[in-house]
Amino acid sequence: EKQTSATAIASAMAVLLLPYSLVGPFAGVLLDRWRRRQVFLYGNLLRALLASATAGLILSHAPDWLFYASALCVTAVNRFVLAGLSAALPRVVDAERLVMANSLSPTAGTLAATAGGGLAFVVRLVVADSDAAAVLLGAFLYLCAALASLRLAPELLGPEAELVQPRLATALTGTARDLTAGVRHLAAPPRREAAWALVTMTLMRFCYGALLVMLLMLCRYTFASTTDDGLRLLGLALGTSAAGFFAAAVVTPWGAGRLGPGRWIVVCAAAAAVLEPALGLPFATAPMLVATFVLGLTTQGAKIATDTLVQSCVDDGFRGRIFSVYDVLFNVAFVGAAAVAALMLPPDGRSVPLVATVAVVYGMVAGAMARFERR
């Protein structure tokens, strides 16, 4: 709403996503050295504390930079916990159901986030019309998540007992060495498919990020005459993209089950390469809404398959750091895409070169992954 140019949007994304990306891979080593159940417990307790502090900053009318710093800390812990969730999932789901579990997990998260937004609306309507009250509700829910994690056995989510190093100083010793070992583990021949899938997903995330910035500009300056109309249209477009995410959760278990996760990624990238320019180049509202659905489906479908490949190929003792690297690649690609879009987009958001470039990247991704699968 407030960032009114492609450059400003890219800058905002960089501020939000890059700080944790600098330390994320090193923090990921801790997910392979600490009990992941304890990460969920203490991570959610920390989020509850930080959210409560953020509510206090809102009430005290603290400077904006202090508020944003607090929000960034909550976001950083959130990404650390989510990487732990991805690393722990194979410990509680058998290999045959991993695709289904990876489909259900983000879907359940989206539903929970929607329910949380509804609860915040009720709190503001019934209890207090205050941003701080909504944030305190979030703090309470984080506390509930921490208490819920206590129902899991401490050793259930891994890593193996011989890898656990509960003391922070011990766990941090040799972090760079452990991170390098994780990357070498991923690059080894038995795990090449997972490595290729990570590269593919990073490039698809780049494409999605570039198109999202273009969508923001189109909704604000081309498809609507006022800012409010543009925001409503943007909300509708993001809603159709979310519907594509839900559709991916339904069709990916079937598609990946029949073709295999790697070939399903090829199908998703190829579909995006064909449909993105066909629906995007008219620069009209209806085709654009269809395109957001298609890209939501293909991007999420490829991500579910990639998560499954990484979980099934990477040993448990390396999953935490690999998923943290995955998270960093995901977000750096998103910020890089926003920067490229800022350079290519005109003020009204219409850019044939950007649409064509994204289509070419999708096509190259599909071709490279298909070639690897044939080999």
Image (cartoon, rainbow, N blue to C red):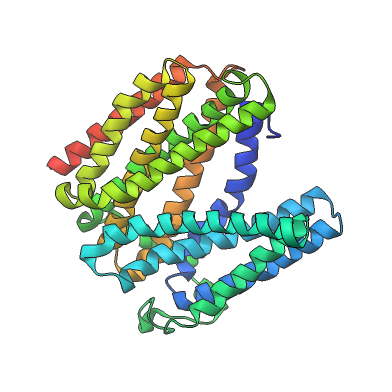
Query: How many numbered markers are drawn?
Result: 0
Tell me if residue 178 comes above or below residue 212 in the rendering.
below
Q: Which residue is at 54% across, 52% downward?
A: 21
Is residue 171 positioned above or below 70 on the image?
A: below
Does residue 266 appear left or right of residue 332 in this picture?
A: left
Vertical order, 28 against 16 (above or below): below
Given residues 176 and 196, the one toward you in this image is 196
Q: Residue at x 70, y 60 (%)?
A: 123
Instruction: Write the residue at 31% across / 68% down.
Output: 90
Looking at the image, residue 86 lies above or below residue 244: below
Please indicate, yes or no, whether residue 202 appears anywhere in the rendered image.
Answer: no
Name the spot of residue 257 as percent of width and height, x first.
Answer: 18, 52
Quadrant in which the N terminus appears: top right
Left or right, 312 with respect to 334, comes to: left
User: Which residue is rendered at x = 37% and y = 64% of the image?
Assistant: 319
- Residue 279 drawn at (x, y percent): 38, 22
Query: Residue 12 sits in which quadrant?
Result: top right
Q: Residue furthest front?
A: 126
- Residue projecting furthest to the left: 374
Give the image location of residue 133, x and y in percent: 74, 61
Residue 5 seen from this side: yes
Dividing the image into 4 quarters, which one contains the C terminus?
top left
Image position of 365 (left or right of 296): left
Relative image position of residue 122 (x, y in whole percent) = 67, 58
